[in-house]
Image (tube, rainbow, N blue to C red):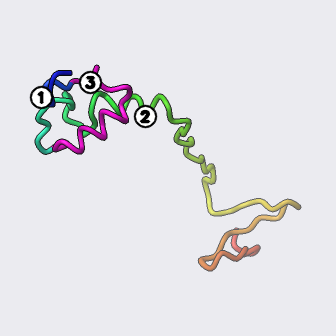
Amino acid sequence: MTGLDSYDCSDFPNGAAAQKFFLASGGPITDPRNLDGDGDGLACEWRAQILKMSTYRRPAPAVRRSYSNCYTGPRGGTYTITATGNKNYGGC
């Protein structure tokens, strides 16, 4: 590195350091050193690094398989759920 204008992604040890410098030097508004080539607001493909490091995975959506308003209780009786959340055994 010879000066501030010669910074590029290879000058940083990781994406976090590049992102910190990117934000301090004008960030996505000006990006004077073109550290955000794809325009996503994250320097040096920092988003890809975040996704690789993250252990969070979005849970699969719960599948609700109730095709009617009638439910079967543990002893075989059927019921519906009222607006207040109570069971109505006479509703099926």
Looking at the rendered image, the quarter that the C terminus falls into is: bottom right
**Which residue bears the numbered disc 2?**
50
Which of the 4 quarters of the picture holds residue 15? top left
SS majority, magenta: helix
Q: Quadrant of residue 78?
A: bottom right
Residue type beneath disc 2 = Ile
Q: Nearer the viewer, mark 1 or mark 3?
A: 1
Give amino acid for label 1.
Answer: Asp
- Which x, y percent locates residue 52? 47, 28
Judging by the rendered image, the residue that carries numbered circle 3 is 9
Which is closer to the viewer, label 3 or label 2? 3
Residue drawn 37% across the image and 35% down it: 16
Q: Residues within 10 Å of mark 3 (few under 14, many from 20)?
A: some
Residue identifier under label 1: 5
Residue toward you, 82 or 68: 82
Find numbered disc 1 in the image and state the secondary structure of the residue it sits on: helix
Could you tell me which secondary element the residue under label 2 belongs to?
Answer: helix
